[in-house]
Amino acid sequence: MADDLTAELGPDRSLLLVDDDISFLTRLARAMEKRGFAPQTAETVAAGRAIVQSQAPAYAVIDLRLEDGSGLDVVELLREKRADARIVVLTGYGAIATAVAAVKMGATDYLAKPADATDITNALLARGEEAPPPPENPMSADRVRWEHIQRVYELCDRNVSETARRLNMHRRTLQRILAKRSPR
């Protein structure tokens, strides 16, 4: 599999991964390295910008929301430094407005988290108007809903009342959802 991708990648296989979820970042870096990329990782906008300033990569996978700002700042700088870079923006917040903003700033594609290495590779290597193939094992609607609730719950510092208010749901309903195991 890596040999097939190496031909598609071209001579410059440099890849910048920017995400503040360290475990995800580490797993993704390992998976992309197995696919023939040469990944560099950054956990902040500042670190991502520093890497782009020193040596703009051919490929990038950048989280939209980071601790110190927006990943779109890295996208914009990378697009200025290297117009041919293939950029995929990842986010846990799949909204049309942010997808449009990411693409206008130069992102090649926009994927909702959790995206796996195969989906990301397909998005990075898709050319022209060709859309990447649909995921082999997409998450169920229940799983997507559960992931979103978990994300908002964590962002609200695990405060059930605040999470329920933001999700516009009854607190007891949210407590029942949180008590259950994650759907497949």
Image (tube, rainbow, N blue to C red):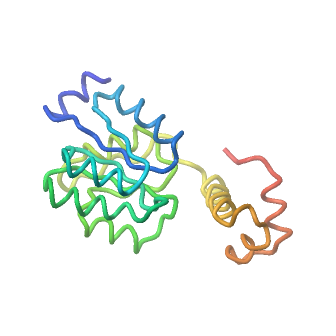
In which image quadrant can residue 97 be found? bottom left
Residue 115 in the image: x percent, y percent?
Answer: 47, 47
Up-down relation of residue 36 to residue 90 (above or below): above
Residue at 42% x, 55% y: name it.
63
- In the image, 180 versus 60, the foreground residue is 60
- In the image, 143 versus 170, the foreground residue is 170
In which image quadrant can residue 160 be found? bottom right
Position of the C terminus by quadrant = top right
In which image quadrant can residue 46 be found? bottom left
In this rendering, position of residue 93 left or right of residue 125: right
Residue at 37% x, 60% y: name it.
71
Residue at 30% x, 58% y: name it.
74
- In the image, 58 versus 127, the foreground residue is 58
In this rendering, position of residue 143 left or right of residue 21: right
Count of labels in the image = 0
Residue 94 in the image: x percent, y percent?
Answer: 48, 64
Residue 55 in the image: x percent, y percent?
Answer: 18, 44
In this rendering, position of residue 168 left or right of residue 175: left
Up-down relation of residue 7 to residue 158 (above or below): above
In this rendering, position of residue 29 left or right of residue 83: right
Residue at 62% x, 59% y: name it.
151
